[in-house]
Image (cartoon, coloured by chain):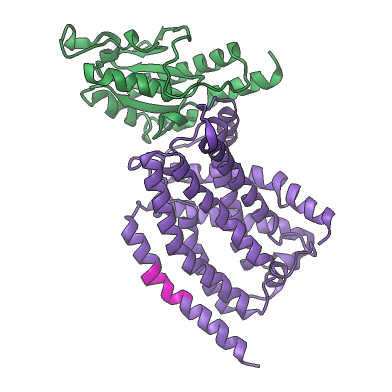
Amino acid sequence: MNLWNRFLCSCRRRSPWIFHMNSGSCNGCDIELVASLSPRYDAEQLGVRLEGSPRHADILCVTGPVTRNSVGAIKTVYGQVCSPKAVVAIGSCPATTNVFVDSRTLAGPLNQHVPVDVFVPGCPPRPDAIIQGIAKAAEILAERGKAQPAVAIVAHADELETNEAPKTSEVQP
Amino acid sequence: MNLITALARLLIFPGLLFAVPAAWFFLWVERKSVAWMQGRIGPPFLQPFYDFIKLLGKTTPSREGIGGLLMRAWPLLAVSSAVGAVALLPVLPSSGGFEGDLILLLALLELPALCIIAAGFSSRSIFGEIGAAREAVMAVAYNVVFLLAVVSIAAAQHTFRLETLAGLPSTPLRWLGLAAILVCLPAKLHINPFSLPNAEQEIYSGPMIEFAGPELAMWELSHGLEWVAGTGLVAALAAPHLAFGWLGPILFVVFSFAIVLLLSTASAATARVAIDTSVRFYWQCTLIFAVLAVSTALLLRVRP
């Protein structure tokens, strides 16, 4: 691996931009995700920026138990995030569908539809745990960049890429 | 201005070699001062640099045809025109310049805004089009005041040459014009309270919504360069740095930094206003002062 590639991966680790997606969440995890950017927790110290467009983001943060209506949207948004990318499942809902298990309106858990890199369990998880999960995802992102060539490969827009092997790790609450 | 000095100004100082690190530094000051105002620690010093390198290494969606070509061209055009605007600033003593370079500077300062409007419409996204339309409306609103202020400064001194303007002593009329330019800068730089085109939480990222990877990196850079050019114009006209010889560039940088700090603190302290309120603000409140400044400047010219 050459020097430029190593430098690029280091920059990737230090600048995780996140896109927040709600897939039928009760708003508990969403509030905690926003709280992790607030003055008390200040995730911007790690370079985290909440982006409005999935095109700008590196890390897709999904909350909620994945309702049947939201599956199409999740796949579209996952395809819109440009690679290298990582997915963080925030809360117990996207990991296991939580108390809504066996509900006929759900199509979860999340890893049936997109490859999930980090699970942050909790109902809701604390902002510290969410920040730890995002930091871990940023490290995975940098490692994934080392495996892929640093030169930008042109990917097709809105196309679900499933060739990335899901490397799952879990944040202890 | 011969070819070698022109190239040196474009590529070294105050052009590319100075302007790009200064752009990253000003972007950091912008984010850091927001963090300070909110009681946070904020991003590390090299954060805009990390973001830029990371974006360069990301993929972009493939877009065929003339639309894809245009979407690659707009950010590059914005960056190059902003660098050109920075290079025209009269920073070094006896650096040359030519009669009418103020007009070229104004044109180059206006090009990034036009690129943003065109980029929003080329992206074919509904949010991009709303953002581009807002940018167009804002450009019509603030440019009247901005251009009148610059014209009043230039007309009072009988010259459109930047170096002569920067070397002349300040008059009360010039301070009035500079205040009008300072009021227009938040709208020109899309920061609060006039962050309407790229309003997050409202229309996502506006015209930039479909841009990814290296194209987005160029947009970030052009935003930083607009900071350098906009604050540099005010610093060049306000600070008597040309009188200090070779200490002048340091004074220029310090003065630009003070203006960046002032504007970003003001942006952190204010909330976004609606589009009709901001247009009314520029056309009703500040236009009167700009017209007064221009008419005073023209009356001063009549006096022998």
Chain colored green? A
Which residue, as the protein is rendered here, is positioned at the far front? Answer: B65
Residue A6 point in image, percent of width and height: 65, 18
Quarter-of-image position of residue B242: bottom right
| Residue A101 in picture, x, y percent from top left | 18, 8
Q: Is residue B189 above or below residue B208?
A: below
Quadrant showing the C terminus of chain A: top left
What residue is at 22 percent from the left and 11 percent from the top? A98
Question: Is residue A54 placed above or below B32 in the rendered structure?
Answer: above
What segment is highlighted magenta in the picture? Answer: B283-290
Q: Say if residue B26 shows up in the picture.
A: no
Q: Is residue B4 left or right of residue B266?
A: right
Residue A148 lies in the magenta stretch: no
Number of marks present in the image shown: 0
Give left or right: position of B5 versus B89: right
Mark yes or no: residue B30 visible: yes
Q: Position of residue B301 (x, y in %)?
A: 61, 86
Is residue B131 depicted above or below A130 in this figure?
Answer: below
Which residue shows up at 46% across the image and 31% down it? A56
Say which quarter of the image contains residue B142: bottom left
Q: Nearer the viewer, residue B33 or B97?
A: B97
- Is B202 displayed left or right of B189 in the figure? left
Q: What secondary structure predominates along the stretch shown in magenta?
A: helix
Q: Residue furthest bottom?
A: B304
Q: Position of residue B256 (x, y in %)?
A: 60, 56
Residue at 26% x, 11% y: name it.
A108
Quarter in which the N terminus of chain A is drawn: top right
The purple-tinted chain is B
